[in-house]
Amino acid sequence: MKLIMDSIVTAVANIIVFSMIPFIWWGIRHRKETNFFKWLGFIKPKFNSKWWVLIIFAIAYYFFYKFDFTVFISKESMEAVENNSSVTANAFAGLGVAAIIPAFITNFIANGMGEEILYRGFLNKRLCSKLGAVKGSIVQAVLFALMHNAIYLLAAVPVGMDFHIWMFVFTGAGALLLGYLNEKIYNGSIIPSIILHGAGNFLSSMMLAFGLR
């Protein structure tokens, strides 16, 4: 029960933190034009691309998700990640069924929804409108990747540069794919990326919870 309560607290805190800048920006510049949630992309997903594009995306995302960059990381760095309590996923390691509910809350709401609000709902849309689709998507992906590097640095997890480089590449690629999914395959809705982002993290947590990796 404590883990569930902790995950709820984390989820609420993350939603507030990640929504703060978008809400202030909307309140100053767009409040009279549209409501906050629609402006972020909380709209019904509508498929507006060709089926073959979605199939190619699905294949690309499958191989992205299956790609295990940890095989390129030093043993020392991996041990530092696996043994550090600051790494969220470690909280679910070995818990089995007991991890399902808190992991769902953490991965779909705290991380999935929270991060998508800021990066794909706010930054990607604003940057693409100013810089164009390609440059805007790249910039938001770089910022998303740097955030993950910063998390490990602020938590003082003693990982090497190899880990930071691969973490940057992996999370940046994921950010590009999620941005493309929302803006090019669907109608600007961030719901598809919330689901996909949350599902990927949740599956990783379940693998740790049930000792599958």
Image: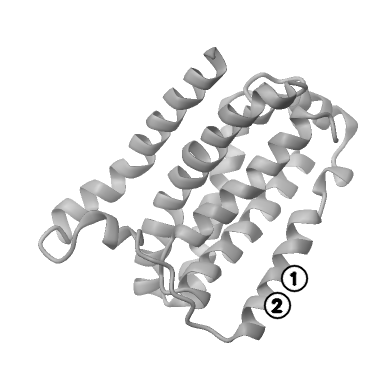
Q: Amino acid at mark 1?
A: Ile
Quadrant of res 32: bottom left
Q: Is residue 94 left or right of residue 143?
A: right
Q: Position of residue 200 (x, y in %)?
A: 66, 49
What numbered label is drawn on residue 143? none
Q: Residue at x 47, y 40 (%)?
A: 109
Task: Give yes or no for contact between labels 1 and 2 (Cβ–Cβ under 8 Å).
Answer: yes
Q: Is residue 166 left or right of residue 76?
A: left
Q: Which residue is mark 2?
A: 56
The front one of 12 and 153 is 12
Find the distance from the CA under tag 1 to the CA under tag 2.
Answer: 5 Å
What numbered label is drawn on residue 59? 1
Q: Is residue 130 in view from this perspective?
A: yes
What secondary structure is found at the residue carrying circle 1? helix
Q: Is residue 100 left or right of residue 16?
A: right
Q: Is residue 91 left or right of residue 9?
A: right
